[in-house]
Amino acid sequence: MQKGFLNSKKARKALKKAESSTEVTGSSASALANEAALPDEVIETNEVVKRAGIITTIPPKGPQTCQMITIPAVKDFILKHLSVLASSRTVSTVKYAVQDTADMGKGLFATSAISFAETFLLEKPLIVFPKNMGPAFSISRPGHSASSDIWTTVCLDESEKMLERVVERMSKEDREEFEALCDDSMADPGKRPLLSRMLCNTLNLDIIEPRGVSFGEGYVGVPRIGARMNHSCSGANVVFDFDPETFTLSYTATRDIKAGDELFLSYVDATVTVAQRREGMLAQRFTCACSACTNATPKTDKLRLEFRARTDLLARVCMEPGPQPPIQTQAWLATTLRMKSEMEKEGLDNEPHFLQVWYALQIMYGRLRDVEKEEMCKRKVEGFLRFPGAIKERKRGPPGSRRM
Ligand SMILES: [Zn+2]
């Protein structure tokens, strides 16, 4: 926890301003007027939480609700911007099932075909938790006199206690869903089973806090179904996005998926080296044995590190106005196809940013009057733009100018 920051004059002033300016109105207010909704539970001030945090339910009612640990100012801000109507959107056909895998415990499998760019699952997280509530979430302890071992134990024990209170607030169904998730505590018997289950099943969530207010260094969430998807750096076929306005996680296919295929997410940033990916995986207590990790070389590390810059440059070059001689376009096309093939081999075609490659190809085939291939690339670009995460990016500018 950034105690120094939260206790600073600047932060207190910002917090006060945000608290006074957050007023729940309209549909959010009617959602709050629900007698059955649980009241917030104040987390007592202790070694870990130096200011009153709360456990609250977001949205306060609905078919799926989430237990969130935060501070009142953040809760009010979320409710003010929550679109209650949109947040109840669901996907009617269930196209997945949890099954045993050969070597990774349980996994999520497609039970019928899922098309490229199809959003096949929407869900509220079960729990949302600040990343830095304990050392396990990279807590910092400026000025604290206890040894790091004692501090670690205190933080972990406090986090476990808070999670017990979170689980108590859940509906019976939600508790059963949470308890059925993968639990790494089997390797660490008797020690903080709830925290252990959290650590095995979290995804980073893009939660927006009021300006000048921060409860920590961002939040993680425990998905219901999404937590069943195993990780692969090279074979991921699904991307997830969290929409703070609906408090909903959505999962979209990045490839055509056949019935029977396993669904994979990439839990870590795919555009870093294998060593950096392994470091990220340590926090979630797993190692990846996908082909990209097993066969990683300095060349593949470089390709991943340069992926965004290279695809951005490609799209920018293609957008340059003026007539391009066909021989020049053909040379670019050959280079682009070579680059595309290298990236596909690494599984980088799963990344939303791969849109830039399809966009550049669409322009090049258009210039070469290859209508069929131009149309095919256009369909790919349109598919990538339907990814929920890409919609936010689209608002920021045309493809060549944005960072995805
Ligand atoms: Zn891997």
Image (spheres, rainbow, N blue to C red):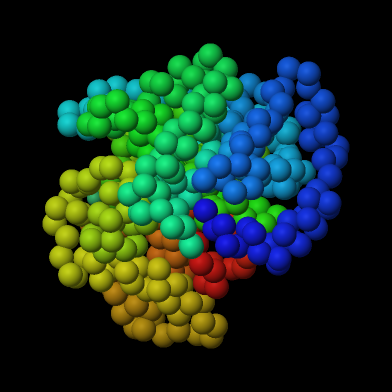
Displayed quadrant of residue 97? top left
Q: Is residue 198 left or right of residue 319?
A: left
Query: Residue 113: horizontal and vertical position, in percent?
Result: 38, 30
Q: Which of 71 and 380 is in front in this view?
A: 71
Q: Which of 375 and 47 is in front in this view?
A: 47
Residue 68 can be seen, yes or no = yes
Residue sitting farthest toward the top: 172
Residue sitting farthest toward the front: 145
Residue sitting at 28 percent across and 56 percent down?
279
**On screen, 52 above or below 296?**
above
Query: Residue 403: horizontal and vertical position, in percent?
Result: 51, 67
Displayed quadrant of residue 171? top right
Residue sitting at 73 percent across and 17 percent down?
36
**On screen, 166 above or below 212?**
above
Q: In this view, does 86 lie to the left or right of 296?
A: right
Query: Residue 90: horizontal and vertical position, in percent?
Result: 59, 28
Residue sitting at 54 percent across and 38 percent down?
128
Q: In this view, does 343 lie to the left or right of 168?
A: left
Query: Residue 66: horizontal and vertical position, in percent?
Result: 59, 31
